[in-house]
Each structure stands twice: as C-alpha cells, then as structure tokens.
Image: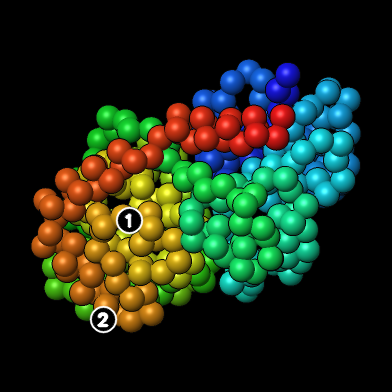
Amino acid sequence: MLNVAFDARDAHAEPVRGWGRHARHLLEHLPATVHPYVESGRGPEVAWEQIVFPRRARRDGATVLHAPNCFLALRRHCPGVVTIHDLAFEAHPGDFSRRTGLKYRWITPRAARSAERVICVSQFTADDVIARYGVERAKVRVIPNAPGLPVTDTPLPDDGPYLLAVGDLRGKKNLGRLVEAHARLETGHRLVLAGLGELERPLPPRVETTGWVDDARLDALMRGADVLVHPSLYEGFGLVVAEAMVRGTPVACARATALPETAGGAAVLFDPFSVDAIAAGIREALERGDELRAAGRERARAWSWEAAAAATLAVYEELA
C-alpha cells in the first residue's frame, strides 16, 4: 500500500516563495496516501532533514520518502524521491551565503545520485542535473510547475501605465540592467519592482519598489501591467512568467536557461546581458500586446497542478 512521507516545511513557511508554492499546490492535489511532515523547530535544520524526518517516516511505515526541496535524506529505509528546481547555487554561488551555499552544494549532488527518482521542473534543469552530477537519465522525470497565485478582484493600480518585474534582489535576477534599459525607453511607463528587498542605491526617475507584497496585491500588479519583464540570468522554470500568462499579461523575458522553454513561443525573448536588447524586447512586447495576451493564455493551458500531482503520483507508484 502506498504511504508517502512528504517534507512539507516549505509549504508552511511565510512569506511563501517559489519552492513553498510548489509544495503547497502539489499537496492540495495529491491523495490522502501522501502525508505531510513539518519540522518541529528544535535543533538544526539539517538534523531534521537527515535524521528526524526519515526516522519518523520509518516509524509511520512510509513506503516512499519525498523531499521537494533537494534535501533528501541520504540514509533511509525506503525509496527516495527528490525534486530539484534549479542549480542556481552552482551557477551563481555569490547569491547565497557561504553556509547556505555549502549546504546546497554538499547535499544536493549526493541526494540526486542516491535518489531512486529525481523530479525536475523543466527539461533545462533535468539536463543541468544530469550533466553536473552524472545522474542517470533513466531515473529523471520532468514535471513542470503550474500557476497557482489566486486571481482576485483586487482593484488594479490606477496611477498610470507601468512595466512590472517580480523577484528578489539577488544578482541573478539582473534588475540593474533592467533599470538601465528602462531609462532608455520613451514610452512613459513606470517600472515597478515587486518582491523581497529594497534597492540600496537611489532609484532613477519613474522606478519604484514595493518591497514584499501579499498575493492579492501581486495578482493586481500582474493584471494591471502592460508588460511583465523577467530579465533573470538563471531560472529553473520561471513561475512569474506562467503567472503573467494565465492573466493575459504580455511577457518579455530573458533568452536564458529554462525561460525559453517555459515561454514556449508566447513571449518576447531578449539577450539579458545587453541593456539595448532588453529595451528593444520591452518595446516589441508593448507593440505586440494583443498578440502576446492571446498567446500567453493559450500557453498557460499546458500547465495545471492536477496534471503535476498526477505525474508525481505516478512516480511514487513506480517505486512502491
């Protein structure tokens, strides 16, 4: 009988971010044979991941162990599944603290090699994991993310047209070049940067930051934007692209890593290392707004959490 122990810590962390949304939406659509486990809060995080969680799972008779955040227990009594969203800690180590980076770079390759199945959220991430860590392709499964931010009736911003970028201020998000590109536009649009953190340097004219925003406000910002711009240098999927598309918001994003795969031909792609290319991509997205709205909505039909959960359940059943 299938009995899955699922590491659900990220689903309960606030504010919820990419991995947390993934775990939360997946759990909402998985059957009752999948049991969420939440850390007690006592002791180091790695001790819970590598000792406490697998011991509790064994006590409860788990037949499969799933770590949806790359920290699969290396010693376990049953088959293990690990989800790897991206390897940004390998490609952009400067975006992580020394301790955090060391943990990711030590545990993740060992978890990927020891797991009976490795789930990746894009083909790009799957290829990256296979190439960097020498993981057998036969045990890797690609299961994409899906939009999950609630679409609400929150009123739209009413203080003029704007472009929107969503994300934290890590270097890989490439917001500095976006700010420079915005300064070269002559469209009259403000640039709104929504997410965690505040820029340390003074903001140029017509650029503003929101800091962290709740789901309702983020939904309204996405629905009201003339273009969602995502200049990130490295993404394992690019969930904000999917969230914009499901709302019919035109997207301009980097031609880098998993973003072309996620965009699926329904966005304007640009070279994220070129300020001129970013500016040109934004102009093109504004000009092709109606076309991109329709293309984005059609592209969004390819994703659902029901399909992701069904594919994940199939992985469990392979092992059970």
Q: Is 165 on the left-hand or right-hand side of 43?
A: left
- Disc 1 vs disc 2: Cβ atoms closer than 8 Å? no
The percent coordinates of residue 12 (x first, y second) are 63, 34
The percent coordinates of residue 11 (x first, y second) are 61, 36
The percent coordinates of residue 169 (x first, y second) are 50, 64
Is residue 191 positioned above or below 51 on the image?
below
Closer to the camera in the image, 100 or 254: 254
- For label 2, count other residues whose C-alpha is less than 10 Å away and answer few (under 14), some (14-19) or many (20+): some
The percent coordinates of residue 130 (x first, y second) are 62, 63
The residue indicated by pointer 2 is: 276
| Amino acid type assigned to the residue bearing label 2 in the image | Asp
Nearest to viewer (mark 1 / mark 2):
1
Quadrant containing the C terminus is top right
Q: CA distance from mark 1 to mark 2?
A: 21 Å
Q: Is 170 on the left-hand or right-hand side of 264?
A: right
Is disc 2 placed on a helix, strand or loop? helix
| Amino acid type assigned to the residue bearing label 1 in the image | Ala
Looking at the image, what colour scheme do you see? rainbow
Query: In this view, which residue lies farthest toward the front?
Result: 138
The residue indicated by pointer 1 is: 263
